[in-house]
Amino acid sequence: MKNVKLKHIMLVILYTVAIIFFFIHISDVAKVLKFIFSVLAPVMYGLVIAYLLNYPYKAFKDHAFKKMGNKHAWLKKLRSPLSLILSYVIVFGIISFLISTLIPELSSSVTTLIDNIPMYEQAVKSASDSVADFIQHWTGYNIYEFATYSNLIALITGNDTTEFIKNIATNYIPSAFSTIMGIGNGLYNWGLGIVISIYLLAGKEKLIRQFKIAIVAYTPEKFHKRFFKIADVFNNKCGKFIVGKIIDSSIIGVMCFIGLTIFRFHYPLLISVIIGVFNLIPFFGPVIGAVPAAFLLLIINPMEALGFIVFLIILQQFDGNILGPKILGETVGISGFWIMISVIVGGGLFGVPGMLLGVPFFAAIYTLIEEGAVQRLRKKQISADDIVPEPEEPPKAPKKSLKIKDNPILEKASELINKGKNK
């Protein structure tokens, strides 16, 4: 008994020291984690791709090609490679088709923007002239004079014009170069990740078996049972949510394309893809996607942009109240408040992937905490209602049953039927 207590005390001390060390050296820990992530980035990307493509892979293998090999045994060996090839060909074929279709529309919108630059320049010049006349009328300063212009720059930036231009050259040019390098590095990591994902999916069963054997062999029974339980909850929540969200966003994208085509908006395919992709992000995604889409239409016609916003609001109401609940159902299992918090925290920590995966991850944690709380209360022989009673729902209005006496037509029909029976 004393050894058990001593072990618990040592664990508490060890955890406390580790937490204190973490917060004291948090910057160094962040650097180490960033280095590890940069080294393992292709592997992590490969895991993500393999996890997402596992769903079409299983659909082909377990459903489409389920009966393959019943008559000829040698055909059974082709189920896995054929499912793997079809999964990659279809998914990346759709992505390639969308990219090849979107590039002409994107170049067309850029061309329109360039063609309209003189008009925008004239509008800006007219507005700036009005502002300059107003300032000169009330202050006596002419902001078009170089000396006044230099003073304004010095007032805003703290430097003169020459120093301001030097700062732009020294700060923005290197950052643009690093951005280009980052894009190149990202493409390399994703390309390598695709190759790794193929190997992961091809040897999925063997790798999972090896991993489970290692976990059971080198960890206590209590730990590995709990570990597999947590992994199952996370896989269940994340898998159902991601697949449901992809289906939901694809339907919304198609409906957006049909609606934009019917109402003859410009760039229907480009805008539909933008709306569909950003719809994957819960809560804030539709708003984020609406900004670039509305801007594209604003370049052409402000009234068209306004009509698009009205159309998008109607579409999102349909998605939030009808389509989303039908597809996702109770997959998430958390309130709108926690969805908003998980999107904010996930986006702040991991960017766009965090905004997408923050909700299912938080839902899994929420489920584990809830199950743990129920088990602990059960051991203490206390129910949740004993601590805080669950709020009562307002009573539903009783449904009125249609009585024959209340309806003269039904009453007359009943009399005729009874007469017929008597005869």
Image (cartoon, rainbow, N blue to C red):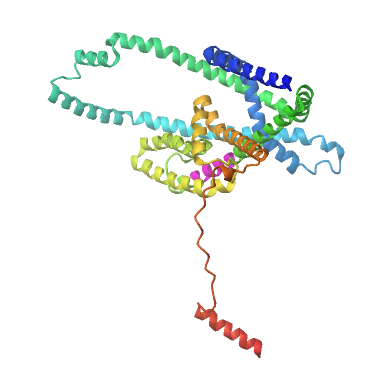
Q: Quadrant of the N terminus?
A: top right
Counting labels gives 0
Q: Nearer the viewer, residue 377 or 320?
A: 377
Q: Is residue 27 left or right of residue 266?
A: right
Q: Position of residue 196 (x, y in %)?
A: 68, 23
State the residue at coordinates (39%, 9%). Answer: 170
Q: Nearer the viewer, residue 28 or 100?
A: 28
Tell me which corner region of the image, top left, top right, bottom left or bottom right, holds residue 384. Answer: top right
Vertical arrangement, residue 37 with respect to residue 117, above or below: above
- Specify the segment rendered in magenta: 245-257
Is 11 colored magenta in this rendering? no
> For the view shown, which residue lies furthest in the front direction?
2
Q: Is residue 132 left or right of residue 43?
A: left
State the residue at coordinates (63%, 16%). Answer: 14
Q: Quadrant of the C terminus?
A: bottom right
Q: Is residue 237 left or right of residue 308?
A: right
Vertical arrangement, residue 291 with respect to residue 13, above or below: below
Instruction: Assign the magenta stretch its main secondary structure.
Output: helix
Is 246 colored magenta in this rendering? yes
Q: Is residue 38 visible?
A: no
Q: Is residue 413 visible?
A: yes
Tell me which corner region of the image, top left, top right, bottom left or bottom right, holds residue 119. Answer: top left
Q: Nearer the viewer, residue 332 or 179?
A: 332
Q: Position of residue 88 (x, y in %)?
A: 67, 32
Q: Position of residue 350 (x, y in %)?
A: 53, 25
Tell me which corner region of the image, top left, top right, bottom left or bottom right, holds residue 35. Answer: top right
Q: Position of residue 369 (x, y in %)?
A: 61, 35
